[in-house]
Image: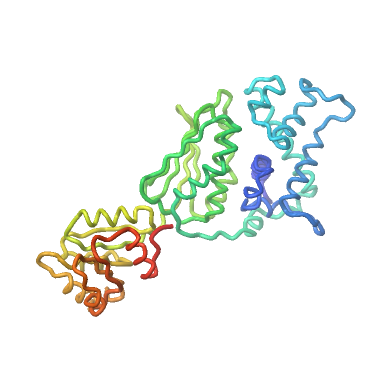
Amino acid sequence: MIERAVFEELVKEAAANLYDYAALETHPLLFSVIRPPEGYTGSKTEYIRKIFGEAIAYFRPVGKEPSLTSPDWRPYLILYKRYIDGQGLQELAATLAISERQLRRDHRRALSALAARLWEQLFPDQETIESEEDANAAFEVQLESFDLRDTLNGLEKVLSGRVAEAGVPLQIHLPDSALMVEADRIILRQILISTCSLALHLAGGAVQIHAGESEGMAELVVLVPPAPDLVKEDFSLEMVSSWAARMGAQVQVEPPGANYIIRVRLPLAERRVILVIDDQQPAISMYQRYLSRSQYQVIGITRPEQALAFARSHHPVLILLDVMMPQIDGWELLQTIKLDEDLHDVPVIVCSAWEEPEMARSLGALRFLKKPVTQKDLLDALTAAGLHGSN
């Protein structure tokens, strides 16, 4: 059966995104657990908003005059003003004339009560609850290779309203070059939204995300300066960890020093190699710069006598070949590549200041590029080779 703690975390996430259509629609688990009844004519998202609104209304005291200062009214007011009216925590604390620290405590209790109410309402008989494994199976994991930086840039836009509401800065530090990961985009997006939403809610200062590589994996390090009343139990990431595990990722929370640290570790995508054979290092550096945001690893060799052995061991998907090199003529090297049993299928693009496209094609090259090669020239050539210059 789905665990109560996992369900409670799901409720917290759904409440936080109750009027964010995209966040609700793309949540990987939400509609596997909370499903509209047969015959319901509205959308799935409308049903979520409906049952949450009814559950929040349940906490409205009956037969009592509304009072902003009454403890009896506080759970209802917190839930209604926070999730129906959309008030931020600072504004809500001022409305209720309580400290932000007190609001955090009452807010946690109100959310737990909301989850309990929905649990009772949706699953009156626990034996009818599907297993978490069955619920997860309703969403098939689709692994693909993509640049993690693009996902993080999108995350910044999605969370802009949440950041403004929390009054806590979110600072995302990206690497200069592509950070290619093997993951499910939708699940990863939800993992990051959930993690950042929790961090923003509990932080006492700027939340920082650092992206990079560590021990053969892509790693996101989320630094959360604790709010004064932050306790370890606040970091409930059970569902996030469960979904991360399904695509070979890990989520870890480390005890605080100056900050709480949340680590999200993802498998790196295998970066396909483009081999550049050119005796001029500036030319190699230029190609690397052109493809710095791509899914390819550009490796250069300035000594053409090493090219064949290197190509056999690294299995490049493409070779960029200069023909004006000392000691070994590029045309001869092209012939050798095309006659080699292991390398003859690797596409070769000849790059030279001497304009000899017919010669290049006659010796088996896919394409000829005249130097100086522009980035557009290179990306067009990659497309011609059935490759793509960037994600």
The furthest residue to the right: 63
On-image quarter of the C terminus: bottom left
Quarter of the image where one finds residue 232: top right
Q: Is residue 8 above or below residue 329?
A: above
Quarter of the image where one finds residue 158: top right
**Residue 346 pos. (x, y %):** 30, 72
**Residue 311 pos. (x, y %):** 25, 66
**Residue 297 pos. (x, y %):** 32, 57
- The residue located at (21%, 63%) in the rendering is 277
**Residue 2 pos. (x, y %):** 67, 49
Quarter of the image where one finds residue 157: top right
Disc count in the image?
A: 0
- The residue located at (45%, 27%) in the rendering is 258
Q: Is residue 277 left or right of residue 221?
A: left
- The residue located at (45%, 56%) in the rendering is 146
Q: Nearer the viewer, residue 192 or 253?
A: 192
Q: Is residue 380 left or right of residue 82?
A: left
Q: Is residue 345 left or right of residue 202?
A: left
The furthest residue to the left: 327
Q: Is residue 253 left or right of residue 105?
A: left
How is the structure coloured here?
rainbow
- The residue located at (55%, 46%) in the rendering is 191
Q: Is residue 122 above or below residue 104?
A: below
